[in-house]
Every structure is written in C-alpha cells, then in structure tokens.
Image (cartoon, coloured by chain):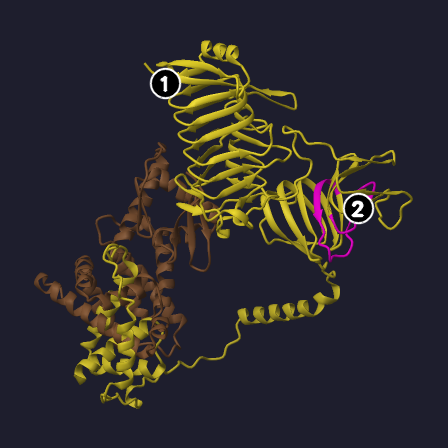
Chain colours: A yellow, B brown
C-alpha cells in the first residue's frame, strides 16, 4: 500500500510541476527521485505526453457519453470524510539535504566598460532630464469634463471619426456631432436627451446644451434643476417637462412641448433676452431670423408624414437562437418596450422567434408604440396567447425586410391613437417595402379606431400575404392591397397583396385592390354596405377567386346587417 | 460570407459568421492563434479567414470542421500560396501535440510551454519553405522547438524550478523516443478513457475539457488541493497503465 501511495505521490508531484503548483521543496524532492532512480524519468515523460494529449487533442471525449452524475456530491462528501477520518499512512519523506542540491556556479565576469554602457548611461541622463524638464515646458493638458453617458443607440455613428457610437460611451463637455442614427444620452443631472441625426451640438454642462442644428428631445426629471438649450438664434428654458427642439441649417427653431411648459427666449444666451413666450403641452413655438416668436397648436401628424421628433429610441430584439419570450429583458437592447417605445425585430436568426404567450395578460400585457417585424431583415413574432397593445404593426418593412407574424391565440389591440394600422409588406420610405406575412390561426385582432385599416404591398417590391385559417378578423376601415408611394416627388409603384381565406371570416369596411388577389375557400368575406356591383367587377378582373379559380363565388347582400357577403361554392 | 473575430477577453475569442455567433473559443485555437501571431490586426485576420474559408473545402477551428463550397481563385500565385497554407495546416494539425509534448517535457510548466509553442509555430510558418516534404514534420518542428527551449533556459537560467543538466538530457532522449508512437497513443488514450469509471472520467472532463482548475474543483468539493492532485495523479496512473497495456502488443512501449 505504501508503495502505491508513493507512486500516487510521484504522479501528483509531476502534475503539480506541470501546472505550476509545486513548491521549491517538493521540486527538489522530485529531482531527487529522478536522480536516485532514473527510470522514473520515464513516468515523467509519459505523464507529460498524457497531459499534452488531454489538453491539445480535440474530440477525445464522446459528446453522447457525458456522465450526468459525475458531479454527484455523495462521492465528494465521501472523499472529504475519508480524508478527515482515514488512518495516517507513514510515507517516508525524502530528506532534502545538501546532496540533492546542485550548486550553481556563476561564471565570474570581468568588469568592462564598453561603448554600449556609455551609450546607455548617456540615454539614461537624457531621459532623466526629459522627465524633469517636461512638466515645466509641456503645455497644460486639457481637462475633459464628463457630462453624461450614452444609454442607448440605434445605428448611431459619430460625425468626428465615422465610428459607431457604443452604449455606455462617456460624453464629455465639448462639441459633438451625430452623423447617423439616434442616441439616448443621460446627463449626470438626470436629464435624458434623445438626439436624432444629423445633429451638431455642444455639451456645455449637465444642465445646458447648445444645439447648432438637428433635433433633440429632452426629458427633465421633476427633481432636476432647470435645463436650457441654446440655438444659434434663441434659447429654450425648461420648467420640468418633456419637449422637442429642432434647429434647421438657417437657424430657424421649432419647439414642441409634450408635457409641462417651456420658455422660448429671443437670445442664444438664456439669461439675456428682451422677448419670451411660454409654450405649454400640445403647442408648437417657432422662432425665425425675423426675430418673431409664433405659438400655435401642434399639428396633426398624418400617417405618411414622419413624426418631427423621435421621443424614444426603439427597443431592438436581441434574442438569439430558438423561441424566446417577449418578457425576458435580456432579449432586448434596453428595457422591455412600453407604449412609448417601438419594438424592432430585424436581423433575427431564421428559425428563431419572439413569443408572446398567455402569461402576458392584463397589467402584464405586451406593449409597444409600434412593431417592426422584419425591418430590412428577418423578423418573426409568434403569439400563442395573452395580449399585445400597440398603435401600428409593420410586418416586412422596407426593402429587404422579411417579416412573419403568426397569431394562434390571444388578443391584439390596435389602440385608438393617431394611427391605427397594420401594414403587411410595405414602407413609406424610399426604396419600397419588404415581404410580410400575417398568419391568423386563432385569437383576434381588435382595432379601437373606426378607421383602423390594413395595407398590403405598399411600395414595390413589397409583397404582403394574409393567411386566415380560423377566427374572425375585423378591419373597420379599408383593406388596401397594392399601394404606391410618393416620397419627395419620387414615385414608387405599388407592391402586391394576397389574401388566402381558407376558413374564418374577414370583415372589412371597404376594399381597394390595385394589385393583388383574394382567394376564398371555406371562409367568407364580408364588406360593409351594398357593394355587389363593385365585387362583380373584382371577380371579372380576377381579383376575387374561389378555390384558386376552381369554384364560383356567391355574392349576397344582408339588409339587416348592411353587408355584402362573398363565399365560394365548390362544385 | 462575412467572418468577424471578436476578442472577448484574455485568450477568449468569438467567431461570428454573417453576424451570427458561431463559436466561442476559450483556448485560442492554434489556427486562429497563428493567424493572430502573423498578422496581429483583427481586420486582416478576418479577411484571411474569410479567404481561407472560401478557398478551402474543409477548415478546422477548435475541433469544429467546416465544409465550405466556395469560389476558386485561379491565379497561379495564389494557388501556390493556398497550397502551401493548406499543407502547413494539415501537417500542423496532425503533429502539434507531439511538438507540444517535447516542449512541455523540457520546460515542465504548461504556461511556459504554451508560450514557447506559439513562438515555435510562428517560426515554423515563416520558414516552412525550408521544410523538405516527405521528411518527418515532427522532427523538423522539434528541431525548431529545441532552439526556442534553449532560448527560454538562457532567459530563465537562475530559476529554482529547473532540472539539472543530466536529468534534462535523460528526459529529452526518452521524450523523443516515446513520441514516435504518437498516433497509437491517442487511439489508446481514447479507448482507455472509455474504461474509466464515471467519477474519474467526470473529473478528467471537468479539468481538461471544461478547463476548471483543480484548486477550484477541490474547494467546491470540500477537499484539499493536495488531495485533489493525488486523486488526479491516481487517474493519470490508471490511464498510463492502460495505455502501456494497450501498446504492449504493438511493441511501442
């Protein structure tokens, strides 16, 4: 037993040597063993080769035979107990004496002064002089004062070095240019700024900023001191609120107040001014080069016009493989979106999906200002239950977008906001829309606005597909299939929309098919009012078919419900 | 194909293909590592890797084999270079472990051995044109490694943890003789690992596959580090006895 114990000790010593865990004394013991018994060198070499094979070779272990219970604590508890209670074994320890020590004799070197030493001495003196004199003559370094930090970014790129701006980048007092995208900055005073490109600013202090051109939205927490934004012509002093400010290249300034009130002053220095006006929530104030301050109610924003201010950066889905839950904060670029924040799904891995399930109901429901499912890339959302509240849903947005939204169960509430819209394959931006698919296999979609509408195929090459396999889908406004686009005078022709009504009922307020087709199988299409003549024209034009043209379509009008009903009659 | 290699810590890298994270490389693989040694610049490494991925049918990164169908560059010069790269990689994949064994046997500390191996491969890559095809790649690699080891000894000549010259010589000659049976040893080890009981295999995997230090495992299990080294030493002994038994009929031990 003692011999076996000694062998174990030898193996342990070799392993400790390899792993750099051996003490000086133990190393001398090991060397003494080798010296006394050179055949043990063989054990050392074998150990080294074994170690090297274990660390350097791949695929040594079968993936399938991963032992599941090797972490079984019982074994280790047993080992621990045994270690404490086992009888002591007397292992003769090698005496470390002088005979095992190897005296290293260092060759005596003659002192010589060569030219390298002289050169080194000269350089040392020069370096010393430099160190002493540098602080005296060197220019005083500019102290940069941090004023805040970037909390969130969206495709943001700095204008100074054309490099992407990362989250948690420190913002220092001084000029700042945003060339691309948007960022959300939190100043050390607690003030939050959402800056949209192109923007040119100068961060002065934690409570004041100069906006030379571009736009920003400022949110000032209630406990914070007043916050001032200076522009080339005027200044805005805030009184605990949220407001947006836009400065055009000619210096014209526009201020929109979302909450509370601000004071618009006719001088870039907010402390020296001759004229000022209060602007309250819902109002827009303008200041131009003539020196006039005009105040008017905020304009209504049409669907096709871009909102003047980005009040919140979108929250981007960052979930990786497989199907992962909406309410897992680690799947989002910032927090889980609320009703003021858009949810973007782009560049998702094919096969992965964001899942909204029955746990997301009532106060825990899923919210988003609007959804972009498949924005210039792949995006997929599957709703198997629960509730989702939003203003708009875009599926397959902008060219290159590939969006899929599948509703199996649960309720989607399209809120009664300024826009109440579902777009399947489309974009109002230049370049046209992407490909979108909305699959309805159950559940329901509720528009809380009587003019809530669905657009399919908005701007070529957009293509929208609506598959209804069960349930009822009620569109109170218009179902528009194939819509052209006109941005800054550049016309984008219409895309196409396709509806496959396999089962269930599709209610629409009105219908406009420019390019596309509705194919009815076991389901029914119900259109408000008596539009039988219009429906006949659609059938003649091949826009309405039954079982892909294999069945005739029956058109009827229900006077009581004031509805035109179209159903397929298979032979 | 867009390949991005992102550094995720000391000796930890991530490889992204088309923005999708493909693998984590905890132990920097020799392949990526030697690219890093030669080119230093991550952008350039990405480009080279991309090029290699496009031009090679198979590529191995840290044990993962990628099969790639790509576009062939037809220029003669590039073809020759690619052929050279492929030859070097193929030979290195098969023999790196033997070269490492020699270095580790000589310097007996894995951290030092890792550093020397990196330097050795860099030199081997630079002077690969001097290698005579058909001769032993291991012997050629060891001759370069020997110089690196001597340099290391020279640099650390006052280290206390250094075997005396006669023991060093004995170890060196046994190592070179033993390494001739490298291929058989790997197969034998693979079979012997299968024969280990579940606890011993578990410990081996925890330490060598997952890279958990023995000190940490010992702390978690409530036993002393010394005992843990003895447990691991015992498993090494079992494995070596098993390998010897397996190699005996072949006359390789």
Side of B81 relative to A533 (left or right): left
Query: Residue A223's image quarter?
Result: bottom right
Which of the numbered marks, if any, corresponds to residue A468?
none
- A534 vs A329, nearest the viewer: A534
Query: From the viewer's perspective, is residue B31 above or below residue A281?
Result: below
Q: Which residue is mark 2?
A: A262
| Residue positioned 31% across, 65% down in the render | B206
Q: Quadrant of the N terminus of chain B?
A: top left
Q: Which tag is nearer the camera, tag 2 or tag 1?
A: 1
Query: From the viewer's perspective, is residue B38 above or below residue A283?
Result: below
| Residue positioned 17% across, 60% down in the render | B191
**Which residue is the extreme one toward the front?**
A560
**Badge 2 local density, few (<14 within 10 Å), some, or many (20+)?**
many
- A257 vs A105, nearest the viewer: A257
Q: Quadrant of the C terminus of chain B?
A: bottom left
Q: Which residue is mark 1?
A: A547
| Residue positioned 65% across, 32% down in the render | A306
Chain to which the residue tagged by mark 2 belongs: A
How far apart are labels 2 and 1 at the CA level?
61 Å
Give how far across and how far down residue B129 sits, in percent. 32, 48
Give how far across and how far down residue A346 sits, in percent. 49, 39
**Badge 1 local density, few (<14 within 10 Å), some, or many (20+)?**
some
- B73 vs B173, nearest the viewer: B73
Question: Where does the magenta region start and end?
Answer: A212-241
Query: From the viewer's perspective, is residue A471 above or below residue B141?
Result: above
**Which residue is the extreme one toward the left?**
B249
Viewer can see residue A249: yes
Side of A451 relative to A507 (left or right): right
* Magenta stretch contains residue A234: yes
């Amino acid at each position: 037993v003692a011999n076996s114990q000694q062998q174990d000790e030898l193996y342990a010593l070799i392993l400790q040597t390899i792993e750099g865990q051996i003490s000086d004394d133990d190393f001398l013991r090991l060397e003494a063993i080798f010296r006394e018994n050179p055949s043990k060198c063989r054990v050392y070499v074998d150990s080294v080769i074994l170690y090297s094979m274990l660390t350097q070779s791949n695929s040594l272990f079968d993936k399938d035979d991963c032992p599941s219970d090797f972490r079984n604590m019982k074994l280790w508890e047993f080992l621990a107990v045994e270690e404490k209670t086992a009888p002591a074994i007397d292992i003769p320890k090698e005496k470390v004496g002088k005979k095992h020590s190897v005296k290293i004799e260092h060759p005596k070197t003659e002192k010589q002064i060569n030219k390298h030493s002289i050169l080194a001495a000269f350089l040392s003196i020069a370096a010393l002089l430099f160190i002493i004199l540098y602080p005296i003559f060197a220019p005083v370094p500019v102290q940069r004062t941090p004023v805040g930090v970037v909390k969130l970014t969206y495709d943001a790129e700095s204008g100074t070095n054309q490099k992407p701006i990362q989250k948690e980048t420190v913002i220092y007092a001084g000029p700042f240019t945003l060339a691309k995208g948007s960022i959300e900055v939190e100043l050390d005073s607690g003030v939050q700024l959402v800056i949209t490109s192109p923007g040119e600013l100068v961060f002065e202090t934690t409570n004041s900023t100069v906006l030379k051109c571009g736009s920003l939205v400022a949110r000032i927490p209630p406990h914070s001191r007043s916050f001032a934004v200076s522009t080339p012509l005027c200044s805005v002093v805030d009184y605990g609120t949220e407001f947006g400010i836009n400065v055009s290249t000619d210096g014209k300034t526009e201020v929109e107040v979302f909450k509370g009130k601000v004071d618009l002053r006719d001088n870039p220095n907010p402390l020296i001014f001759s004229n000022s006006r209060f602007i309250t929530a819902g109002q827009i104030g303008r200041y131009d080069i003539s020196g006039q301050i005009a105040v008017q109610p905020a304009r209504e924003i049409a669907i096709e016009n871009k909102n003047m201010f980005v009040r919140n950066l979108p929250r981007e889905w960052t979930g990786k493989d497989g199907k992962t839950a909406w309410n897992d904060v680690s799947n989002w670029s910032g927090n889980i979106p609320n009703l003021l924040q858009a949810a973007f799904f782009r560049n998702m891995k094919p096969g992965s999906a964001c899942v909204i399930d029955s746990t997301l109901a009532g106060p825990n429901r899923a919210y988003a200002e609007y959804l972009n499912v498949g924005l210039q890339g792949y995006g997929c959302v599957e709703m198997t239950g629960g509730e989702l509240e939003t203003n708009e849903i875009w599926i397959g947005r902008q060219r290159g977008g590939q969006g899929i939204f599948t509703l199996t169960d649960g309720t989607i509430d399209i809120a009664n906001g300024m826009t109440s819209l579902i777009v399947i394959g489309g974009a109002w931006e230049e370049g046209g829309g992407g490909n979108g698919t909305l699959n309805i296999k159950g559940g329901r979609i509720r528009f809380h606005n009587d003019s809530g509408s669905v657009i399919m195929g908005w701007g070529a090459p957009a293509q929208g597909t609506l598959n209804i396999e069960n349930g009822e889908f009620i569109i109170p406004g218009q179902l528009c299939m194939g819509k052209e686009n006109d941005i800054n005078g550049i016309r984008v022709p219409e895309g196409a929309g396709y509806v496959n009504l396999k089962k269930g009922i599709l209610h629409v307020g009105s219908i406009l098919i420019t390019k596309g087709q509705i194919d009815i199988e076991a389901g029914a299409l119900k259109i408000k009012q008596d539009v039988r003549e219009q429906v006949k024209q659609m059938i003649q034009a091949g826009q309405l078919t039954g079982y892909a043209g294999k069945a005739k379509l029956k058109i009827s009008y229900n006077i009581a419900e004031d509805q035109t009903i179209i159903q397929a009659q298979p032979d | 194909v867009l390949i991005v290699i992102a550094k995720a810590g000391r000796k930890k890298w991530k490889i992204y293909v088309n923005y999708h994270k493909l693998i984590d490389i905890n132990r920097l693989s020799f392949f990526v590592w030697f690219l890093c040694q030669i080119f230093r610049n991550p952008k350039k490494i990405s480009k080279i890797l991309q090029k290699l991925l496009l031009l090679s049918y198979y590529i191995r990164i840290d044990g993962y084999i990628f099969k790639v169908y790509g576009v062939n560059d037809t220029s003669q010069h590039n073809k020759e270079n690619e052929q050279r790269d492929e030859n070097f990689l193929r030979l290195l994949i098969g023999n790196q472990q033997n070269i490492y064994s020699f270095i580790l046997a000589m310097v007996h500390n894995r951290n030092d051995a890792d550093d020397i191996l990196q330097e050795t491969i860099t030199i081997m890559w630079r002077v690969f044109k001097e290698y005579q095809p058909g001769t032993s790649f291991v012997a050629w690699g060891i001759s370069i490694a020997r110089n690196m080891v001597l340099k290391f000894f020279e640099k650390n000549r006052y280290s206390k943890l250094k075997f005396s010259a006669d023991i060093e010589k004995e170890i060196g000659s046994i190592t070179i003789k033993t390494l001739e049976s490298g291929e058989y040893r790997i197969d034998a080890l693979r079979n012997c690992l299968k024969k280990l009981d579940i606890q011993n295999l578990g410990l081996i995997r925890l330490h060598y596959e997952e890279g958990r230090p023995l000190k940490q495992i010992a702390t978690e299990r409530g036993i002393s580090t010394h005992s843990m080294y003895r447990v691991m030493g015992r498993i090494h002994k079992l494995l070596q006895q098993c390998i010897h038994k397996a190699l005996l009929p072949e006359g390789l031990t």
